[in-house]
Every structure is written in C-alpha cells, then in structure tokens.
Image (spheres, rainbow, N blue to C red):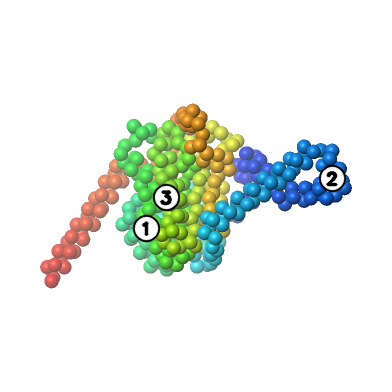
Amino acid sequence: MPMHNGFLPREGFKADAVFKIIRQTALNPNLTLPLLLVAKYTKKGQDWAILHPTAYKRLKTLLVLGLLRWANSYLSRRVLNNWVQDKYDWSKEIVLITGGSGGIGGKVVQLLAERGIKVVVLDIQPLTYPTSSNVYYFHCDVTCPNRIAQAAREIRAVVGGDPTILINNAGVVRGKTILDASERDVRFTFDVNTLAHYWTVKEFLPAMVQANHGMVVTVASAAAWVTVPNMVDYAASKAAALAFHEGLAAELKTRYNAPRVRTVVVNQGYTTTPLFRGYRNDSPFLVPTLEPDTVAEAVVRQVLSGESGQVVLPEFVNATALLAAMPHWYQHSLRTRGEVIMREFDGRHVVEDVDRFYEERENAEADQDQDQDQEASAVLVQE
C-alpha cells in the first residue's frame, strides 16, 4: 500500500491544492529571492523594476513573507523538539496504537507494518484486515486502567519490550444532544476520547521517560476547536485531548527531564469512516471530506520523521483554531449554522449498548475484587 505522492490529494482539486501552489511559488524564497536578485543586479531586471514598481514592491513583500514563514516553521520545529535531536531505529521500535482494528487506525497499522515495524493493536473490536507476523493484536478495553495494565504485561512478554511509540487513536461519537445523551453516553465518550489517553500514558510513558526516547501521538480532531449541535460531548472530549497533549509536552520537558520524548497531535477534519456515517459536509471545497488513507499517511509520515509536531488536515482547518479570537456574534452564528451537519447522523457505534458495557465491566471488576479477597483470606488461613 504505497503512500500517495501526487500533486493533487486523493480528494481532488480543493483548497489544499491552491494553498500548496501558493507555498511552492509566491511564498517560496527559493523562487522569489533569485527573481529579486535578478531585478536588483541585472540591467534587464533593473529596467523591469523601473517600469513595474508595483510588481517589484510586491515581489519584495512576497520574499519577506516567505522568509517569515520559513523562520516561523524552523523555530516551531526546533522548539517543539526542545532543540535536541534523537535517532529512531525502526527495526527495534515498537508502535502501540489504540483503536487500530479498522478505520484510520487500521490504515496506520498497515502502513507501518509494511515497513517491517512491530505494531501492537489494542482494541475491543477484532482486526478487519489481514496482517503480517509483526502485527500483534490484544483485545483490550482501553477505558479500564486494569485491563491496560494486564495487556501491558502480555505485550512485554509476547512482543519483547515496552512500546516506544504510543498512538492514542481510539475514538467514539454518540451523535446525541446534551439532553438526549444519557450519563453513560457522555461518560463513554470521555472514557474513550480523553481518559484512555491518561491510562495508556501512565502505563507506557515511564519506560520512555527512563530511556529519554519515544513518542506519544494524540489523535484529537478539528472539533477540538469548534463544536456544533449533537457533537457537544465529542467536541468537549477532543478539546480535552488537545489540552492533554499540550500539557504532556510541557511536563516532559519541565517535570520528567525527557526532552527527547516526542509529542504529536492530530487535528483532522471530517473523514469518511463508518464512525461518522451521515455527517454532512457543508464546506466541501475549503474543508473537503478526507479519505482515511489521507489522514493515516499524514500520521505515519509524522511518526517516521521522529519529531514532535502537529498534523492538521485539511489545511483550512487551521483557521478554526482562531475561532476563540473572533467576535462572539461570528462564533455563535458559525456554531448555529452548523446544526445541519449532524442532523442525519447515523454513524457506527463501537459499543451499541453502553449501559450493558458498563454493567459487564462493573460485574467483572466486582468478581475480580472477590477473587482477590478470597486469595487474601486463604493466605491468612495458611499463616
């Protein structure tokens, strides 16, 4: 499954293609600087600058903007990586991904596995694609710290070590209004989309910190920046996941003395997975509907770079991050106009009956506690 490298994305000629053309031409110092030097130091160029002063002025402006863009990108990249470099030996790294049985996560697994990288999948759903011997699947409820700890022990025994790359990809959406959503609907959304990040990081980050090597990828969403009706719990959970990523990055440097442990956050727009079936895209040019392969490839490229960073798809989604700085009349009108987006929502639910899900988990935990109490009593009797 080779990665897409064409000029146009899979989604066709959309706003992203226009932005790419602008980056590679008008805002590309490798192009504007030679043109400016020709205009300044050659006879024909000087004649052109005299005859077209406005165009000459605009060329200088484009060069300055391009250099500022380059400097901003360089500074952001270096700061996000704490000004230190690290090396990844992909024959030895172990990637763990939650929710990797299908969808975007499944594509990520296949792309990494094809490169010979060991990949561990934690999911409550079985794998939906054929795998190779370097893919390990563990049935695991990532909302339960005890289940994660149990899976971690199995991983260390079977795979032969701690994961060095953790991709928190598992996500759910219920698609209900605030009043229609039950307590467990809301709890399940946050358990998977936010709290699971805490539990997996608590289990697998210490080994990364000790080695001062590793990466934590947080798959958030464009919804972290803007919410619409019937997506309030989802958007809130993704905003919390984004905050988790930001805080984790700061703690790695200031609290754990692990500046080489990388952090990546993914803010993707609407993607055509069964999870969001029935979602209506009302801005198909600026914010095109993404293919799962497109998002997966962007994630894999960032992981293989071995660097911290942010993956935003499509590019116009960056504008939604500015929403909080906009006037309230604009913010409110944008959110209310978005009410059509989830009106026909009929997405696949990973767990259809969340009440039964929690009841079964509570019963299992109660049985486990009872077994532990019995073992403790037996020990006391033996003594």
Q: Nearer the viewer, mark 1 or mark 3?
A: 3
N-term mark: 3 or 2? 2
- For discs 3 and 2, the disc positioned in front in the rendered view: 2
Q: Is residue 216 above or below residue 235?
A: below
Residue named by callout 3: 244
Q: Residues within 10 Å of mark 3 (few under 14, many from 20)?
A: some
Looking at the image, is mark 1 or mark 3 earlier in the sequence? 1
Reading the image, the residue beneath label 1 is 202
Residue tagged 2: 46
Sort mark 1 into few (<14), some (14-19) or many (20+) by Cα contacts within 10 Å: some
Q: Where in the figure is residue 246, as x and y percent of width and height? A: 45, 50
- Answer whether residue 377 is visible to the viewer in this image: yes
**Could you tell whether 49 is left or right of 144 in the image?**
right
From the top left corner, tell me how far across and down residue 53 is, in percent.
Answer: 79, 38
Q: Residue at x 43, y 40 (%)?
A: 235
The disc label shown at residue 7, or none: none
Q: Quadrant of residue 25?
A: top right
Q: Cα distance, mark 3 to mark 2?
A: 55 Å
Q: Residue furthest right?
A: 43
| Residue at x 57%, y 35% (from the top left corner) | 284
Q: Secondary structure at mark 2?
A: helix
Query: Which of marks 1 and 2 precedes in the sequence?
Result: 2
The type of residue carrying mark 2 is: Gln
Residue 133 visible in the displayed image: no
Q: Image height check: is 347 above or below 382?
A: above
- In the image: residue 71, left or right of residue 358: right
> Which quadrant does the C terminus fall into?
bottom left
Please tell me how crowded label 2 is: few (under 14), some (14-19), or many (20+) other residues with Cα within 10 Å. some
Report which quarter residue 376 is drawn in.
bottom left
Judge by depth and name the residue closer to the eye, 365 or 49.
49
Q: What distance separates the C-alpha of mark 1 from that of mark 3?
A: 13 Å
